[in-house]
Image: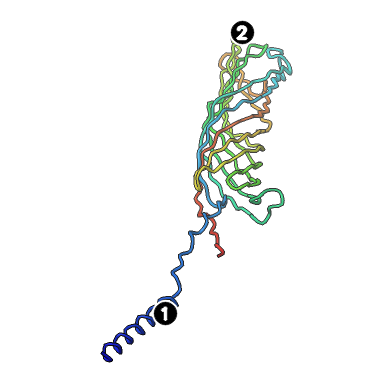
Amino acid sequence: MRRQIHMASVGAIAIAIAGSALAAEPPVYTPPPPPPPIFTWSGLYLGVQVGYAWGSDPVDEVDVLTPRFANNAFFNLQPKGVLGGAHVGYNLQFTNWNWLSSSGVVIGLEGSVDGSSLSGTRTSASGLTMRLRTETQGSLRARIGLAWDRLLIYGTGGAAFAGFDDNYVTVFGTPFFVDEQDSKTRTGWTVGGGVDYAITPNWSIGVEYRYSDFGRTTDYPAVFVGTVPTDGNVFFTHHLTQNQVQARFTYLFSTPAPVVAKY
C-alpha cells in the first residue's frame, strides 16, 4: 500500500512539472502581413498614343518679277488630321519634395514619334492650288509634374520636328504653269501638359495636349515658260503651328518601392 502511494505521488509530481514547463513556453506569434508597397512613377516606360491635330499655316505668295502672281498675296492653309505613334521615356520621383503634393515631384525625359494624316488644301486668288501634308512628326521633351499616389499631373516642353510636303499646281495661262512638290523637315518647339493615372503598378492611361511651332520656311517652286524654268521668280513663305490632343497608354518598367513595416 505504501509503495502504491509512493508511485502515485511520483506520477503527480511529474505531471505537475510537465504542466509547468508547458505553461512557461511562450505562445507562437505570427506577425501580420506587411502593408502593400508604395507606388512609384520612377523608371523606364514605353507606350503608344493616338489623337487628333489641327493647325494653321499662313502663306505669303510673292512674285518678284511679273504680276502673273498676286504680289504679296496671303492665304492660310488649315491642316488637320489624325496622328498616332509611340513614346518612350524615363522618370525620377522625389517623394521628399512633397510640399505641393502628397507623393512629391516627378521629373523625366520623353521622346515620341507619330505617323500623321495631317493635310490642308487652299487655292489662292492667283489660281495657285497648294496642298500641305505631313506623314511623320516627333519630339524630344522634358517633363515635370506633381504626384498624388497614382495620379500624375505634368507639364512638358522641348524640341519638335516634322516632315512636310508642299505641293504647288496651277496654270496661269499658256504657257505659264507650276507643278512642283517641295519636301523638307521642319524643326521647332513644343509645349503642353497632361494627366496620367496608373490603373495597375505598371499600366497607366492618360491624356496630353501640346502646342507646336515649326518655324518659318520658304519654298521656291519653278515657274515654267513653255519648257523653260524660271527659278526665283516666285517664292512662298510658311509658318506652321499646330495643336494636338492624344490619349496615351503606357507600360512602366518599375519595381514598387519597398515599405519597412514597424511592429
Q: Name the residue tied to disc 1.
A: 20
Looking at marks 1 and 2 on the same chain, the residue that comes earlier in the sequence is marked by 1
Q: Nearer the viewer, residue 119 or 105?
A: 105
Viewer-side label of 1, 2: 1
* Quarter placement of the N terminus: bottom left
Asked if residue 71 lies left or right of residue 187, the reply is right
Using a 10 Å C-alpha cutoff, classify the residue at mark 1 as few (fewer than 14 neighbours), some (14 to 19) or many (20 or more).
few
Q: Amino acid at mark 1?
A: Ser
Residue at image x 62%, y 38%? 194
Q: Name the residue at 57% across, 23% down.
A: 119
Residue 214 x %, y %: 65, 33
Q: Please, is residue 199 above or below residue 235 in the view?
A: below
Q: Which residue is mark 2?
A: 173
Q: Residue furthest bottom?
A: 2
Location of the C terminus by quadrant is bottom right
Q: Which mark is residue 36?
A: none
Q: What is the spatial separation of the Cα atoms under label 1 and label 2, in whole angstroms?
A: 118 Å
Residue 134 location, x and y as percent?
56, 28
- 103 or 77, which is in the foreground? 103
Mark 2, residues whose alpha carbon is within 10 Å: few (<14), some, or many (≥20)? few
Residue type highlighted by circle 2: Gly
In front: 135, or 165? 135
* Residue 188, image x, y percentages: 66, 37
Q: In this rendering, is residue 68 above or below 262? A: above
> Horizontally, is 71 left or right of 77 in the view?
right
Q: Mark 1: which secondary structure?
A: helix
Secondary element under disc 2, as helix, strand or loop, is loop
Q: Is residue 248 above or below residue 142?
A: above
Q: Dividing the picture into quarters, in which one does residue 154 lie?
A: top right
Instruction: Report how many numbered discs are placed on residues in the image.
Output: 2
Task: Please provide percent x and percent y for residue 55.
Answer: 64, 26
Q: Quadrant of residue 167?
A: top right
